[in-house]
Amino acid sequence: MSQSYFDTESKTHKSFELPGAKPQYNPDRPGQVEHIFLDLTLDIPLQSVSGTCTITLNPIRGIK
């Protein structure tokens, strides 16, 4: 079995990073999903779906 390793020091591979690119990070999460409740109605003959979604969140950190 052949294995290939990505070596950042190697000049045979090009970087995925564009010139001038800066790191971007996801924003902090204000809450953690505790529960998701779906109340769906399926209408098979009409091929339609309707419903509601209720999400319960627990705060992770206080609001500034």
Image (cartoon, rainbow, N blue to C red):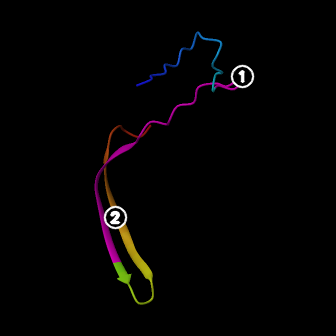
Residue sitting at x 45%, y 23%: 2
The residue at which mark 1 appears reads as 20
Residue sitting at x 36%, y 66%: 53
Q: Indicate left or right for 33 with 1 as reference.
A: left
Residue sitting at x 56%, y 14%: 8
Q: Which residues are magenta?
A: 17-40
Q: Is residue 30 above or below residue 57?
A: above
Q: Indicate left or right for 27 with 23 as reference.
A: left
In this view, the residue in front, 49 or 37, is 49
In this view, the residue in front, 14 or 44, is 14
The spot of residue 57 in percent (x, y) is 32, 51
The residue at which mark 2 appears reads as 54
Q: Closer to the N terminus: mark 2 or mark 1? A: 1
Is the residue marked by circle 2 packed among few (<14), some (14-19), or many (20+) residues within 10 Å?
few
Q: Based on the displayed image, in which of its 4 quarters is residue 43 positioned? A: bottom left
Q: Quadrant of the N terminus?
A: top left
Mark seen at residue 58: none
